[in-house]
Amino acid sequence: MNRTKIKICGIKTQQDIVIMNRTKPDYAGFVFFEKSKRHLTYDQAADLLANLDQGITPVAVCVSPDSARIEAIARLGFPIIQIHGNLTNEMIEQWPNQIWQAVNVEGEDLPEIMSHPKIVGYVVDGAKYGSGQSFAWSKELAKACASLPHLILAGGLNAENVCEGIQLFQPDIVDVSSGVELPETGKDAAKVEAFIRAVREGA
């Protein structure tokens, strides 16, 4: 059985990069969305990417990106873009690499997903992306998610509940941001380490 991979999202500072390089999650998420407290400029992202361990795959995270944003993110060299909000065929055709479509669960049903060879993963998240709030986990929803070709489980995960989420949903990847942060200082090394340990030793 393949192990569940880990994405730490919302990388914001060089200190976050130090934590990533020491703990070595599989993916690191960089947010390009002005309304998020984790938003980065393209120059900030370039500086962070320059110091990220090459064994960690960077993921660009954005919301309903326009053509200029997609072009700018592509120039930074991201191999994967994670798109919340609207995802159109035009976006898919413009982006040169792999795509993760984020779907926000508000009730008991899985929202409609798009199918395209470039879409290689589906991020199942809470109703409000970046809120740190989980959606209502259920066996029915887990069964619906099982039909997704590559499941990334997000929304309210932390070291205490991630193993339960893995057991219920059997995701390919677990995605955490708020659950490994302190309110005032951002990413916390101890919380990151606890989350990664829970996934790798407890799942």
Image (tube, rainbow, N blue to C red):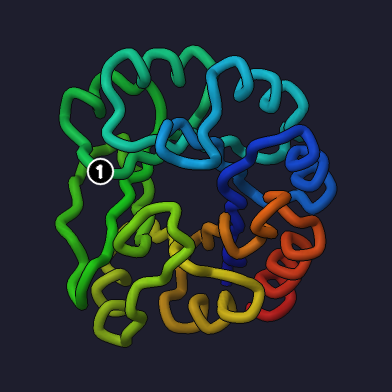
Q: Residue at x 60, y 64 (%)?
A: 179
Quarter of the rendering containing residue 152 = bottom left
Residue 35 drawn above or below residue 149: above
Indicate whether 1 appears above or below 87. Answer: below
Q: Residue at x 71, y 64 (%)?
A: 196
Please identify the residue farthest to the front as the structure is shown. 184
User: Which of the 4 quarters of the picture holds residue 52?
Assistant: top right
Circle 1 packing at 10 Å, graded few (<14), some (14-19), many (20+), is some
Q: Amino acid at mark 1?
A: Gly
Q: Name the residue rendered at 61%, 57% in the picture.
A: 6
**Residue under the point 53% across and 62% down:** 174
Residue 15: % across, % down: 80, 39
Residue 2 lies, with reference to residue 139, above or below; the image says above
- The x, y position of residue 105, in whole percent, is 26, 65
Quadrant where the N terminus lies?
Answer: bottom right
Q: Which residue was labeled with disc 1?
A: 85
Residue 135 appears left or right of 179: left
